[in-house]
Image (cartoon, rainbow, N blue to C red):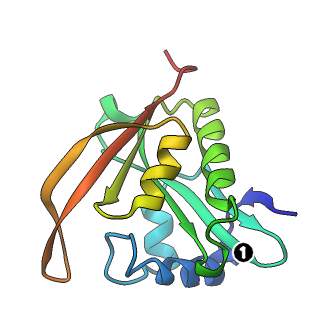
Amino acid sequence: MIRIEELRRRHWPAVARIYEEGLELGTFEETVPSWEEWDASHLRSPRLVAREQEVLGWAALAPVSSRKVYEGVAEDSVYIAKDTRGRGVGRALLEELIRLADLGGIWTIEARILFGNHPSVLLHERCGFRHVGVRKRIAKKRGVWRDVVLMERRSPLVE
């Protein structure tokens, strides 16, 4: 039975391990940040982990800007352990992240997905995100220019 819980400091070793598994596949980062760096760069809530006994995945929101006019706009991160992918963990996390974001006054969630990460694009489509477009050669990872798929979801609850 998968449980979705609030991500806490004590979960960081498992979260960091899952983050590291995603370095090659879908993250824009080159290395796993420290807890302090990650904590400072993400909204306080929602931050989630999916667990059975072990942490299977995590999801969180980061602000897209410090400008007041964008205070209700956040970018999502959803990471699933390699051996857990395809079991619905990502969808459970993203659906709960969306629900809590709506309740917390987030009016738009953005997803920036490295081109070619089809599972992430499909996950976001299934959770109500729309395609905004593809930003060509906008991200440089390990010396290689990468295209980025930009998707977004507008909350129906926030006016």
Q: Is residue 43 left or right of residue 116?
A: right
Q: Determine the image quadrant of residue 18.
A: bottom right
Q: Determine the image quadrant of residue 12.
A: bottom right
Between residue 72 and residue 139, name the one nearer to us.
139
Q: Position of residue 98 (x, y in %)?
A: 59, 40
Residue at the far top in the pictured view: 159
Q: Which residue is mark 1?
A: 55
Q: Position of residue 48 (x, y in %)?
A: 66, 58
Residue at the far right in the pictured view: 1
Query: Looking at the picture, does residue 103 appear above or below residue 12?
Result: above
Q: Secondary structure at mark 1?
A: strand
Query: Looking at the picture, does residue 93 appear above or below residue 53?
Result: above
Picture residue at 33% right of the left edge, 38% below the top: 131
Q: Is residue 126 left or right of residue 55?
A: left
Numbered marks: total: 1
The amino acid pointed to by label 1 is Val
Q: Position of residue 116 (x, y in %)?
A: 32, 64
Picture residue at 20% right of the left edge, 83% below the top: 142
Q: Position of residue 66 (x, y in %)?
A: 31, 44
Q: Is residue 43 left or right of residue 8?
A: left
Picture residue at 88% right of the left edge, 63% below the top: 1
Query: Looking at the picture, does residue 44 appear above or below residue 103?
Result: below
Q: Callout 1 environment at 10 Å: few (<14), some (14 to 19), or many (20+)?
A: many
